[in-house]
Image: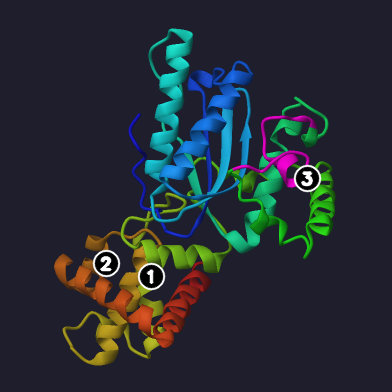
Amino acid sequence: MMPRKSRLEVEGSLYHVFTRGNNRRLIFNDDDDYRKMIELIAKTKAKLPFYLYTYCFMPNHLHLLMERRQDPISRIMHTLLTGYSRYYNRRNRRVGHLFQGRYRSILCQSDQYLAELVRYIHLNPVRANIVRDPSAFRYSSHRAYLGEEESGFLDAEPVLRHFGATKKLARKRYRAFVKAGMKLATREDLYGGADKRVIGDEEFIGNVEDRIGKGFKNKGRKIESADLQRLRQAAANATSLTAREICSRSKKRTVVLAKELLIIVGRGIGASNAELARLIGVDCSLANRRFEAGVAKKKDCQEMQKLIDQVRKEYHKKRL
């Protein structure tokens, strides 16, 4: 099983990771299988450190809510799933793929979605009619959150602190939070959808777009010529220039700045480097240099980030 190639590998970010059995077949047959997965997670976590906030091992799929540290999610999951596949195939005297294609990982906005994702994952056995109460399901981290079993390698404390200053209060409020979720409809947005790679508000997604840069597309939308024209006008408005001035060969500071803003936001909406280069009348290498220069400025200049936000808002406003 090859590691998933992803441009959304951001250190310190939260990921909802899930994978299914091939053709939706079982990947866990008995307690020994569940225990083996837990053992492999502990070993992988010791070797390739990451924060694990939640897990749920369903009969034919699994969910992990994890925060990346230094090692990429792709390496962590490759190590974990390859190890389990070898164990499972050896134990059951079978060959071939155990998991259905590559796992999926969705980059999530932590402050807004952390608690919701924990609840969503822990309620999977209830939604699937396996149990009536999540605490009756033995193969998730829910019981550890309640203090009913040892947390082990689980990093539950950062989540519980969202619910109260003391463990007793936090666990009480957490229990009530999960119970309330049982009465609510399933939130499909927490699953990401077929092509969504990020969940969060517009500002969060915009920041991801800026940080990831080239090639990022969250919804797979084709960039139309009219979108590019609106983008150029948005950059012009933010810098008090005309579209013609942005396309000129002038080396004035405001013209160079406008080009940088346009390219940064343009890559964020999924436009290619070649499309943006044609839009402002430069070659691809220069467009790429302007992108790199703009990103470098953004790190040290709050005003640059404000202008990027202004261009993005202007662009989206004009699309409505």
Instruction: Say above or below: 239 vs 282.
Output: below
- Residue type beneath disc 3: Leu
Q: Residues within 10 Å of mark 1 (few under 14, many from 20)?
A: many
- Residue type beneath disc 1: Val
Label for residue 146?
Answer: 3
Q: Would residue 189 be found to the left or right of residue 257 on screen?
A: right
Give the residue at x 78% y 63%: 164
Label for residue 276?
Answer: 2
Quadrant into which the N terminus falls = top left
Give the percent coordinates (x, y) of residue 104: 47, 39
Point out the tag, 3 or 1, that comes first from the N-terminus: 3
Is residue 148 magenta-colored?
yes
- Nearest the eye: 198 or 47: 47
The local secondary structure at tag 1 comes to: helix
Q: Residues within 10 Å of mark 3 (few under 14, many from 20)?
A: many
Give the residue at x 56% y 41%: 64
The local secondary structure at tag 3 comes to: loop
Q: Is residue 320 visible?
A: no
Q: Would residue 311 be found to the left or right of residue 150 on screen?
A: left
Segment tinted magenta in the rendering: 136-152
